[in-house]
């Protein structure tokens, strides 16, 4: 696995970001976890939305302040993944299911250790926000995410049905 870094989205990421999104769609995956709704918006609209959600004064009324990053591979500047770090859980959906961190890795780059590296970088960022523990949720059948969360210190605290009826696992990670 090559080194990655987290980068805040900028205008210059547009082409690479659209390529990232289109790869999910090509694999018939139409929900991109941790993308702050990028799967539902054009890049320019999404960039405004994400930038607004990063500040208390401009966050959507139905959301919480969040920092959304691209995980960029350093050797070639390819977007490998996305991670969305919510600063609080002051939202019913996040408290019940979504948690502090959502993330995704592009289909062609999975099973290479990038998810674990991304979550670890995200946990370091969460510490800078003053968080001492974070919640993550994933489907019970999403073995790669379960393994990633456990590698990062995740403790399973709850198993329950998600909105679509599928079973999800809720994990907490305590930050040192």
Image (cartoon, rainbow, N blue to C red):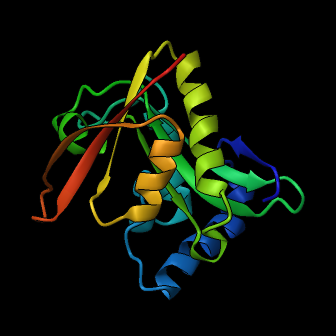
Quadrant of res 109: bottom right
143, above or below 132, in the image? below
Residue 112 screen position, x and y as percent: 68, 64
Horizontal relation, residue 71 to residue 147: left or right: right
Residue 58 screen position, x and y as percent: 41, 29
At a point 59% along the width and 17% down the height, the residue shown is 128
Is residue 28 at all visible to an observer of this figure?
Answer: yes
72, above or below 154, in the image? below
At a point 38% along the width and 75% down the height, the residue shown is 30
Which image quadrant: the C terminus? top right
127, above or below 49, in the image? above
Is residue 57 at all visible to an observer of this figure?
Answer: no
Residue 174 screen position, x and y as percent: 44, 22
* In-front residue for pair 170/65: 170
* In-front residue for pair 95/175: 175
At a point 51% along the width and 51% down the height, the residue shown is 148
At a point 66% along the width and 56% down the height, the residue shown is 114
């Amino acid at each position: 696995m090559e080194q990655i870094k987290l980068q805040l989205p900028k205008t210059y990421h547009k082409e690479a970001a659209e390529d990232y999104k289109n790869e999910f769609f090509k694999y018939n995956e139409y929900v991109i976890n941790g993308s702050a709704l990028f799967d539902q918006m054009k890049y320019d609209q999404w960039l405004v939305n994400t930038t607004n959600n990063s500040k208390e004064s401009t966050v959507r009324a139905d959301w919480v302040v969040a920092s959304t990053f691209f995980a960029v591979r350093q050797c070639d500047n390819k977007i490998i993944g996305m991670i969305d770090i919510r600063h609080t859980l002051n939202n019913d959906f996040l408290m019940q299911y979504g948690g502090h961190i959502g993330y995704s890795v592009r289909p062609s780059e999975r099973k290479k250790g990038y998810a674990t590296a991304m979550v670890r970088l995200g946990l370091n960022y969460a510490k800078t926000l003053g968080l001492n523990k974070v919640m993550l949720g994933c489907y019970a059948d999403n073995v790669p995410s379960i393994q990633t969360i456990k590698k990062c210190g995740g403790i399973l605290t709850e198993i329950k049905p998600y909105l679509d009826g599928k079973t999800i696992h809720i994990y907490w990670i305590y930050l040192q």
